[in-house]
Amino acid sequence: MHEDELKEMLQDLIWLNAVIAIELLQITENTSAILRKAAPPETCLVEHNALREVALGIAERYRPGTPLAQHLRGHQ
């Protein structure tokens, strides 16, 4: 495998892991809301949004211009 191919593969994996992290946060919130029959605590929502932004920043660093930011902001 050439160095460029390896770099591309690692960028893809980093981006994909950031997407998975963002979606996992959403699943956690949805599950919490279902079990509580109410929204998750505000502190969790604030912290989750901060974590989403970090994951989005990582994803955008390696794959800028994808619809991920638009999708993420649609969750909120």
Image (spheres, rainbow, N blue to C red):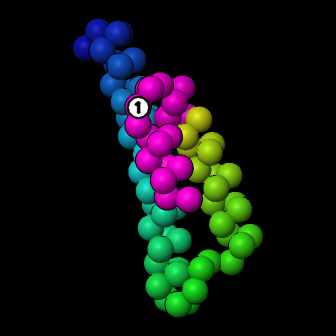
User: What type is the residue that disc 1 sits on?
Assistant: Thr
Considering every residue shown, the one lying at the far right of the view is: 43
* Residue 32 horizontal/vertical position (percent): 53, 80
* Residue 33 horizontal/vertical position (percent): 52, 81
* Residue 76 horizontal/vertical position (percent): 56, 59
Residue closest to the eye, 35 or 67? 67
Does the magenta stretch mainly form a helix, a strand or a loop?
helix
Read off the residue under disc 1: 66
Which quarter of the image is occupied by the N terminus?
top left
* Residue 2 horizontal/vertical position (percent): 29, 9
Indicate left or right for 74 with 41 as reference.
Answer: left
* x 47%, y 74%: residue: 30
SS label for mark 1 = loop
Vertical comparison of 56 with 65: above or below: below
**Does residue 18 belong to the magenta stretch?**
no
The magenta region covers 58-76
Circle 1 crowding by C-alpha within 10 Å: few under 14, some 14–19, many from 20: few
Q: Quadrant of residue 42?
A: bottom right
Vertical comparison of 71 with 40: above or below: above
* x 44%, y 26%: residue: 65
Vertical comparison of 16 with 40: above or below: above
Residue 68: in sight, yes or no?
yes
